[in-house]
Amino acid sequence: GDPLSAFGSIVGLNKVVDSSAAEKIASPDTFIEAIIAPDYEEEALAILKTKQKWGKNVRILKTGDFLAKEKKSLNIKKVTGGILLQEEDEKTYIPHHLKTVTQRPPTQKEKDDLLFAWIVSKWVKSNAIVLARDKTAIGVGAGQMSRIDACLLAIRKAGQRVKDAVLASDAFFPFPDVAEEAGKRGITALIQPGGALRDKEVIETANKYEMAMLFTGMRHFRH
């Protein structure tokens, strides 16, 4: 979703890397520092190590089945004088909590993209906005002090691809400004936790632009 930032990047996958995926990763004009995945086919390893010049130095890491956990993992943050512990955010969404709050419900394609963007937002530092289309992240606004700034950053990253995209927010909209900006840019659907004092204004703004909007009833808010 961000070709500029992809140069000198780390590639992470949640499936075994086969030769087809390896060819994509080692395509021309790429420069990869490290790759991490559950496992690799032998042919894929050969491609990653030899096809591009960076293959001689690329770090290739194998996680094994990282989804097979015996118990919940803890998120540990170091602070002055001690540490903070909390359970990892392992939730994605709860289907029966999803609620359409606008006059127009999302199409099936929009819903698929919304749920994809929502899952991506879980891993983005707050304030986080994710734009997606065809189950691909096309713009990410991460770690901003305000939600509207995160939105504007994601829109800038998406460029001309923003039209007909969907938008996910890791926490609720405190103001209708994000919905307003999304509507002006041609974004068609939104997903967010809901629960703000100005939810009614946000819903009215989404309706004004004929956008669909889902409330998840839960937030991610990664720090």
Image (cartoon, grey):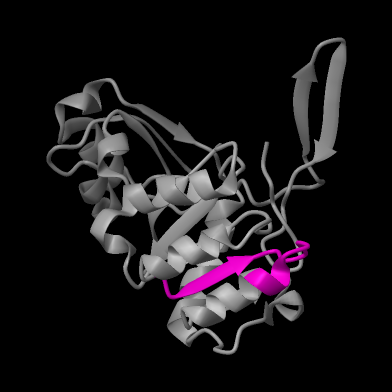
Where residue 190 appears, as percent x and y from the top left, is: 54, 70
Q: Which residues are magenta?
A: 187-201
Residue at x 60%, y 63% (from the top left corner): 176
Q: Residue, x 49% and y 74% (percent of image)? A: 189
| Depth order, front residue of 171/174 | 174
Residue 97 in the image: above or below residue 158: below
191 magenta-colored: yes
Residue 73: percent from left, percent from top:
77, 40
Q: Residue furthest top?
A: 81
Q: Is residue 18 visible?
A: no
Left or right of 209 on screen, residue 89: right
Confirm whether residue 74 shows in the render.
yes
- Left or right side of 17 for 4: left
**Number of callouts:** 0
- Outermost residue on the left side: it is 28
Q: Quadrant of residue 222?
A: top right
Identify the image quadrant of the C terminus: top right
Compared to residue 188, the image places residue 42 above or below, namely: above
Q: Position of residue 171 (x, y in %)?
A: 67, 54
**Residue drawn at (58%, 48%), measured in percent from left and top?**
147
Is residue 184 magenta-colored? Answer: no
Residue 121 coordinates in the image, percent (x, y): 56, 53
Identify the residue shown where x is 54% and y is 89%. Answer: 104
Q: Nearer the viewer, residue 69 or 186?
A: 186
